[in-house]
Amino acid sequence: MKLKVVPASRGLQWAQQGIRLCLSQPLGFVSLLGMIATLVMLLLGFQILGLVLVVIAMPLLWMSFMLATRRVMAGERSRPPKPLPTARTGSSWAPCTAWVPCWSR
């Protein structure tokens, strides 16, 4: 790895591009930020263990912003990732949530 030296004006351009990208689909990025903030607040309710889990999960949570940015740059719609797996019920796929278990029909 080698550090690339660039002029300071490049940092301003980088920030402006990021703001323009966020303004192109603000609802997707704001909803993603809201999901992350909610998850962090819920985890911090578990005092010591929650703090450790937040620190461990932060790289994964911020990676979701990188993936959302990649989608927007590719011209796709920004949407929050599906954090929960799907379970097969019969011949169709139904989403599962942590609160409502899926049973086979």
Image (cartoon, grey):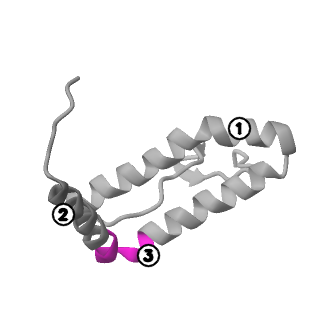
Callout 3 secondary element: helix
Mark 2 residue type:
Gln
Instruction: Tell which circle, 2 or 3, labels the residue nearer the N-terminal end.
Output: 2
Label 3: how many Cα within 10 Å (few below 14, some 14–19, many 20+): few
In three-dimensional space, the C-alpha distance between marks 3 and 1, rounded to whole angstroms, equals: 27 Å
Label 2: how many Cα within 10 Å (few below 14, some 14–19, many 20+): few
Split into 4 quadrants, where in the image is the N terminus? top left
Residue 86 location in percent, x, y? Answer: 57, 46
Front residue (pair 68, 45): 45
- In this rendering, the answer to whether 48 lies above or below 9 is above
Front residue (pair 91, 26): 26
The residue beneath circle 2 is 13
Callout 2 secondary element: helix
Residue 105 location in percent, x, y? Answer: 70, 49
Residue at the image position 84 percent from the left and 52 percent from the top = 45
In three-dimensional space, the C-alpha distance between marks 1 and 2, rounded to whole angstroms, equals: 35 Å
| 96 lies left or right of 42 | left
Front residue (pair 14, 89): 14
What residue span does the magenta drawing correspond to?
Answer: 22-28
The residue beneath circle 1 is 53
Is residue 13 visible from the viewing direction of this image? yes
Mark 3 residue type:
Leu
Quarter residue 21 falls in: bottom left
| 99 lies left or right of 54 | right
Is residue 100 visible from the viewing direction of this image? no
Residue 34 location in percent, x, y? Answer: 58, 67
| 59 lies left or right of 65 | right
Instruction: Tell which circle, 3 or 1, labels the residue nearer the N-terminal end.
Output: 3
